Image: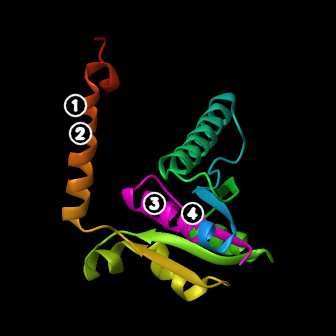
């Protein structure tokens, strides 16, 4: 395996998908590309305000990817960051079609059947259309998330007010 493509958004399950992808890549000696998809520009002509907004979106996405790379706590595999544009499934499939990509990883939120049917699911659609093998990482159960949040709060409390952004 040479490269793993991990598609992320700003959800908690994206962090888990990034962690799984980086951990797997470290184990098999693969490189990782973390990608985030921004919607296609909707305006015909660009104005200065719209161009600034689009740059801000690009900066946000790049920051999100860098944060996910940092938060996973992995320093092992080489990790690239890419901000894609377009409809998420199409953009991810196009990026996955690259010859060096061997596996695509995405997270999925726990939603009921009705919500998935009405709202759709990027992961569900990718299962049908992705040109490469796809690993879907499920959302952690609520009990696990609650324990993780409690651990983070306990650590912040142990570090004191200065670690929480309050002058001490």
Q: Nearer the viewer, residue 76 or 124?
A: 76
**Separation of residues labelled 2 and 1 (CA atoms):** 6 Å
- Point out the stretch of residues depicted in magenta: 1-24
Q: CA distance from mark 2 to mark 3?
A: 21 Å
Q: Does the magenta run of residues contain 22?
A: yes
**What percent of the width, then of the height, locates residue 22?**
57, 63
Look at discs 3 and 4 and give the one toward the viewer.
Answer: 4
100 horizontally vs 50: left or right: right
Q: Residue at x 26, y 23 (%)?
A: 160
How far from the left and from the top, in percent, is residue 3?
71, 71
- Tell me if label 2 and label 1 are in contact, CB under 8 Å: yes
Position above or below: 105 against 56: below
The residue labelled by disc 3 is 14
- Tell me the element at label 1: helix
The quarter of the picture where residue 45 lies is top right
Q: Is residue 80 above or below residue 28?
A: above
List the residue tagged with mark 4.
22
Q: Which residue is mark 2?
A: 153
Given the current orientation, which residue lies at the most extreme bottom position?
128
Q: Position of residue 101 (x, y in %)?
A: 72, 75
């Amino acid at each position: 395996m040479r490269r793993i493509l991990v598609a992320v958004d700003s959800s908690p399950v994206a962090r888990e998908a990034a962690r799984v992808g980086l951990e797997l890549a470290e184990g098999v000696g693969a490189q990782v590309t973390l990608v985030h998809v921004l919607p296609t520009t909707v305006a015909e002509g660009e104005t200065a305000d719209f161009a600034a907004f689009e740059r801000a979106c690009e900066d946000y996405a790049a920051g999100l990817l860098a944060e996910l790379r940092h938060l996973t706590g992995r320093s092992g595999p080489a990790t690239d960051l890419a901000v894609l544009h377009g409809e998420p499934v199409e953009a991810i499939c196009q990026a996955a079609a690259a010859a060096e990509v061997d596996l695509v990883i995405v997270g999925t939120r726990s939603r009921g059947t009705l919500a998935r049917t009405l709202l759709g699911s990027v992961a569900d659609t990718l299962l049908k259309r992705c040109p490469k093998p796809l690993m879907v990482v499920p959302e952690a159960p609520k009990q696990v998330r609650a324990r993780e949040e409690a651990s983070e709060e306990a650590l912040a409390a142990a570090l004191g007010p200065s670690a929480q952004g309050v002058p001490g």
